[in-house]
Image (cartoon, grey):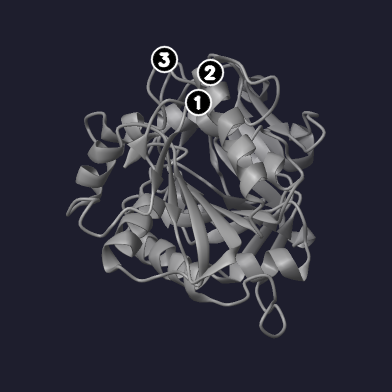
Amino acid sequence: MIQNSTPIQVWENPLPTDVGNSVEEFLSKLGGPTLLYLPGRDHSRIRAVSTLLHGNEPSGVRAIHHWIRSGEKPVVDLLCFVGSVKAALAAPKFTHRALPWQKDLNRCFLPPFHGTEGQIAEFLIEKLLEAKPEALIDIHNTSGRGPAYGLSLEEDNTHKALVSLFSDTLVITHLRLGTLMELAENHFPSVTIECGGAKDPDSHAVALKGLERYATTESVLTLDGIWMGEVLNNPARLELCDGAKVAYARNPVPDVALTLPEEVEEYNFGILNPREVLGWLGPLGLKMLCVYDAEGKNVLPEYFTERNGCLFATRPLKLFMVTTNPEIAESDCLCYVVAADEK
């Protein structure tokens, strides 16, 4: 039975027959942000999962729906949060990061908790602190096409072990954006998993396999062997200035701050060479771009320069979260960048 007298509904022990035959039917039954309590074989421990903080990132909720329908019992209790349900269900389904009148839920985990999304964030944190999970995994999709990777605030074997359930690429970030991971990490090991593009079936498979490992592995905080994956440190965010526009085309588009090639997502986790043109700048050139580091400083000259109206890297860069969705690019960021020699 769903209890819904708080900012977040609570549904204890949903049965396989309760959650519908499809993820869309499952979300319709939820109707809003919901905490699902899935009892495990060991009630002395609990693990937390969060997903759908953005309504256009469905891989995690698909995995949770599939898991519940399987009827399999987790090794320990699971507490699963499904966030932006209404945004996900708004037509066309799974295309809205948030509804127009809503704040980005994964930017609201920072006191003071104002507005509806702030109340949801505050209530979720309170419930997590009551539950005292041994870990939290927050499952997302990348804004564009690309491989799966994990994000962590700490580079240690505990966080590597959690990420390794899903991916062998770890990004250590010191950026502070008001995300769930940032706040939760103060209390228990927390990582964010980016499963790959939202429309890629491989992304759904990554989420499902990772969730199954998380739910069935006796110890998820111990690294099995030596970490052999890639570690990237200190990404910065390439952003447009307020009001600036981006376009994606084969040639420069007039009256936009930046035109990027239609195939720019191919740079995800690839190397951008300083000799390659990343895009075409508008009339105001670099003035409409910013690169913010972990301290909130604009360090654009360390990463990018302008030559003949084109945007170039100042040194070899690795890019990720590159998107061709102009709404996300203009409201959030164009991509994340890290110097290739700082891997």
Q: What element carries label 1?
A: helix
The residue depicted at 61 percent of the width and 29 percent of the height is: 122
Question: Mark 1 belongs to which amino acid?
Answer: Glu
Give the residue at x 74% y 51%.
153
Point out residue 17 in the picture as x, y percentages from the top left corner.
20, 57
SS category of the residue bearing label 3: loop
Q: Nearer the viewer, mark 3 or mark 1?
A: 3
Q: As rendered, which of 104 and 68 lies closer to the eye?
A: 68
Quadrant position of residue 45:
bottom right
Q: Is mark 2 on a helix, strand or loop?
A: loop
Residue placed under numbered mark 1 in the picture: 330
Q: Mark 3 points at which residue?
A: 101
Q: Which quadrant is the N terminus positioned in?
A: top left
Query: Which image quadrant: the C terminus?
Result: bottom right
The alpha-carbon separation of the residues under discs 3 and 1 comes to: 17 Å
Residue type of the residue flagged with mark 2:
Ala
Q: Looking at the image, which residue sits at the far bottom? A: 225
Above or below residue 27? Residue 99 is above
